[in-house]
Image: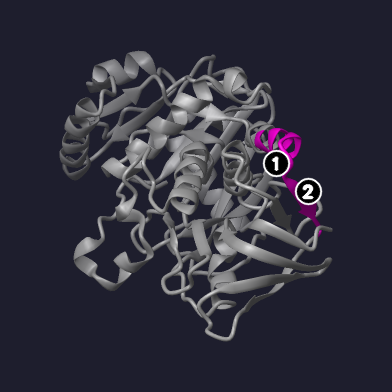
Amino acid sequence: MQTSADFVVIGGGCIGVSVAWHLAKRRAGKIVLLERNEFLGTESTGKCAGGIRAQFSTEINARLSLLSIDVFERWADVIGEPLQYRQWGYCFLLTSDALVSSFKKSHAMWTRLGMNVDWLTPAQVEAKLPYVSIEGVQGATFHQRDGFGDPNDITMGYAKRAREMGVAIETGAEVLEIKRDESGRRVTSVKTSKGGINAGTVILCTGAWTRKLGGMVGMDVPIDPIRRQIIVTDRFDEITDPFPMTVDLSTTLYFHRESGGILIGMSDQTETAGFDTGFNEEYGEKMLMTAMERAPVLANASPKHKWAGLYEVTPDHHPIIDRLGPIENVYACAGFSGHGLMHAPAAGLVTSELVLDGKATSLDISQLSLDRFSDPTRLHDEANVI
């Protein structure tokens, strides 16, 4: 393993490899990416649902998505690798006056940003989504540019190109300690299970584990791990393709096509912070029952695969992309609250700009600073979280 680097990126999920590639693209210097597992993208990235969408309630999240979607749509030209990316849209079912009111405000914002989002009546929902029970549905929104992509294609595409540009990717390298100089204001080296690296700059792309890594330099980074579960059925053709990612925001139920079957997810609002990734069968049954209520045809589907992963959640459901306070050469790009995959291209770009230029220029990321949590008036919670 290299013993020194200008930039040490910690974390080999979709965010880390995107940051590393963007730094290499700028010819930033010697770059090392550290991943504690044997393979890249095996934690939250590899366990996610693959959703890519711009229908958020805050402008900064919508802009992160739009910037990323532009890249996903040009992936073959930008990265030169294949990407399974189905722009079959996202359809949000609105089942309460509060949701209708909230989405009307969001719809105005989306229109201002140039998004072409359809507002559907219940009759239009029934015609577009014949598999859905429209009981309680007052309307829906649909954005064709939304969809879902393959997390492995995205991670490995960035990783392959980063390696070709000189990035050293070290797997099986768990970070044990981040050492600072006598002033405590600068990191000098990173100690790993494979040896030490003298580091010019360190970037934490460590998702649900960022609070632990931030603690190594004396900083509290408010990101908590929250378990989320997914079920994928056997091959199921009673819902015909293409059908959009369908979301019932009142229950947080969502489902879309996956490997010939149907992927089903739903947030357990009673989950508390922790690193348990065991599958909760009792809650899994609740997911299936809720799915069958909204899409009765799913009663004919048979569960095949079940797993759980971790959301990396901040108090306002927005990421932290910032330098870590008084530590001059440590940055964080984490806390995407379930939206890391869809924001990976934009996150890598603005992080590289922040680190190399002192300020992101492709997008104003001032709302994503770490110090926002010290002032409650600066927090704007993302409402469209599933």
Name the residue beneath numbered marker 1. 305
Quadrant in the picture for residue 91: top left
In the foreground, 305 or 181: 181
Q: Secondary structure at mark 2?
A: loop
The numbered disc on residue 236 is none
* Relative to 321, 215 lies left or right: right
Residue nearer the viewer, 31 or 66:
31
Q: Residue at x 31, y 45 (%)?
A: 364
- Quadrant of the drawing holding the N terminus: bottom right
**Quarter holding residue 370:** bottom left
Q: Is residue 355 above or below residue 152?
A: below
Compare marks 2 and 1 and give the one earlier in the sequence. 2
Front position in the image: 270 or 311: 311
- Residue at (76%, 48%) from the top-left corner? 168
The answer to whether residue 57 is visible is no
- x 21%, y 25%: residue: 111
How far from the left and from the top, in percent, is residue 229? Answer: 57, 50
Residue found at x 59% / y 70%: 213
Q: Position of residue 266 (x, y in %)?
A: 48, 47
Question: What range is drawn magenta here?
Answer: 158-172
Q: In this image, 310 relative to 92: left or right?
A: right
Quadrant for residue 150, please give it: top right
Query: Residue 129: x, y in percent?
Result: 39, 19
Q: Looking at the picture, does residue 289 appear above or below residue 380? A: above
Would residue 167 be counted in the magenta stretch?
yes
Q: Nearer the viewer, mark 2 or mark 1?
A: 2
Residue 39 badge: 2
* Residue 92 is inside the magenta segment: no
Where is residue 183? Give x, y as percent: 52, 84
Looking at the rendered structure, the secondary structure element under dot 1 is strand
- What's the amino acid at mark 1? His
Badge 1 crowding class, 10 Å Cα cut-off, few under 14, some 14 to 19, many 20 or more, is: few
